[in-house]
Amino acid sequence: MLPYEILLNIFFSCKNLANKDILSKSDPMIELYMNDTFIGRTEKVKNNLNPSFSTPIKVTYNFEKLQNLTIKIIDVDNDNNNTGDNLGNVKTTLGELVSQEPGTAFTLPVNDGKGTVTMTYEEIIPSIRKTLTSDYVALGNGLVTQEVKKGSSYKIVVDKFIINAKGIDLEKKDLFGKSDPYYYIYRLIGGNKILIYKSEIIKSNLNPIWKTTEIYTENLDTNCFSQGQKYWIEVYDYDKYGSDDLIGEVELEDLFYEISPDGQEFRGELTDKSRKNKYKKRGEIVLNITHTVNIKEETVNSYKVISNYTFAKNLKAYPNLQSTVSFIDAMKMGMKLNVICAVDYTSSNGSMHDVVDHTMNPYQTALSAVGQVLEPYDHDKKFSFLGYGGHKNGEFPPYFTVGETEQVDGGVQGILDTYARTRDMIKMGDMGTAKGGDMDWRANNGKYYCDDFYQIINAISDKAENDMMTKFPPGSHQLPSDYYIIFFVIDGDGFDMDGTIRALVRASSLPVSIVLIGVGDGSFANLSKFDADGMPLTVDEVSTIRDIVQFVKFNECKTDGTVDIIKLAAEVLAEIPTQVETFIGLYGCNIVNNV
């Protein structure tokens, strides 16, 4: 979940409104309702059929909810209670506004009146967002995680700077003891400081020798390797019971420029220009920096995932990857959400796939609940619709298109119609007898487990990876045009755990999110493990770099035996904006795509 609410200011203007006044023009005002609840109103504009309202209406944006908007246009006759003649209304959703094509006006015709209403919006940026900095940014040309086939060779490059730091005659800040010093290294860019490293605290020592630290080049901006790059070093005295005291600071240059394996020494006299005697020497800091590069080639004996970055290996917690670029920014920059629905047709489903007139089975309910929230964000209202675990047209592939083609027109209703129409054409089975596809090299021992679904994750990851490497390569800082949301409805719980985790580790460094809804009465002990909120999933010593999976039990969203579709959608979709933001932060995406 985001650590803050997403708040938007919505601005309105109208063209060619109806005129309800005889001796003058209408005096229009707009009132906004969300899901039939009054949100706010603009000011009144006198004698104007083409008003531009200067007063925005503030709304809270929730991606995981269907937020229906009704815009009422009123010709104000009574200023005391803001009442008057109805000039018409407009109905839309907040999702449709947010996902509007960049650079195009969101203009809708007025119902029960005449003219049009145009809406624009701005995000109200919370102060916390202005300070968010991703712990790691992948700056190289390769993906953070990737797969390699059996027999393939790849190079492992360990490129790092080794820093040995010490303080000399640091100022004593404590009344009854010596200082407890630690230091920061910042990169200076414009008027901003970008943190590179923070040391440990050395207790009661005015001549500290801090432990050796290693900084990998993959974690440094390319500007760090340029001549003339400036750095800011700050040394503080740790205070257990109050705020830490600045001992001194100094500017250094070229810390990582053409450093040899023999190393280079950097010295700086510490001062504190905020105090009297601002040029008084308050000690000295010495940095000895060496640069090493080790390259080895490895041939893999079996299919595995690897990482080109050390920060994705054997993680015990997810790094903070959010930056100042938000989900709303991504929508404005042109990122589109592509929805892929995937349905489990394995035989353990039994009667849950039965299609009965005027009654929705669990699969139809789940598809409808989540689909109607996602539909406004899918720019062409075409959902991909895939199935697995069943026979179609006499064949049993690892996965298949439920309809005649992968993409289904008509959004969520098109998915529901296709599901019902094709139900009797698909015979339920066991994934252990599936044939073809990529099973000869991606599947464990060339065979799928009874409920495996990771082949669909890999298929979508193939698309996402091809998009990135050909159009928006890592290191370019361009925002990909497509972000993929794979939405599974699953009954089974028997999986190749390593095979599935490999697919998730790979997908975690791609523009992909995964939603899992477990239907039926099973415990989903295995399926729930893929929603690793607390600790990243790890296989082949490589971890999921982002938390991209959200799992919910269908039956836990029931109230008095009836499924609460609003709760169901909210449970599984609430983390999508955060997941988009962590992808943006991982690759430092801040450039609008031009594709």
Image (cartoon, rainbow, N blue to C red):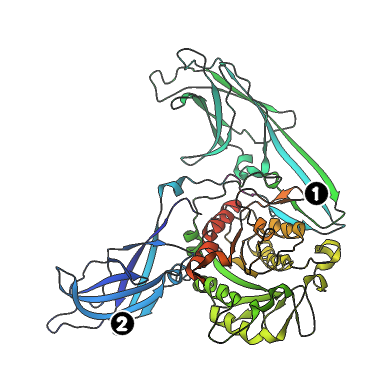
Q: Residue 280: where, in percent of width, then height? A: 45, 17
Q: Please give the range of residues in magenta.
A: 135-139
State whether the magenta stretch is mostly helix, strand or loop: loop
Residue reaching furthest top?
176
Report which residue position mark 1 lands on.
Answer: 155
Please state which of residues 176 and 10 is positioned toward the viewer in this rendering.
176
Determine if residue 404 is in view.
no
Residue at left offset 62%, top offset 82%: 419
Residue at left offset 56%, top offset 87%: 357
Q: Earlier in the sequence, mark 1 or mark 2?
A: 2
Q: What is the CA distance from the residue labelled 1 to the residue labelled 2?
A: 63 Å
Return the mark for residue 115: 2
Residue at left offset 31%, top offset 70%: 32
The answer to whether 345 is drawn above or below residue 594 in the figure is: below
Q: Amino acid at mark 2?
A: Gly
Query: Is 15 left, or right, of 161 in this rendering?
Result: left
Residue at left offset 33%, top offset 83%: 111
Residue reaching furthest front?
560
Q: Residue 82: where, in percent of width, then height? A: 19, 70
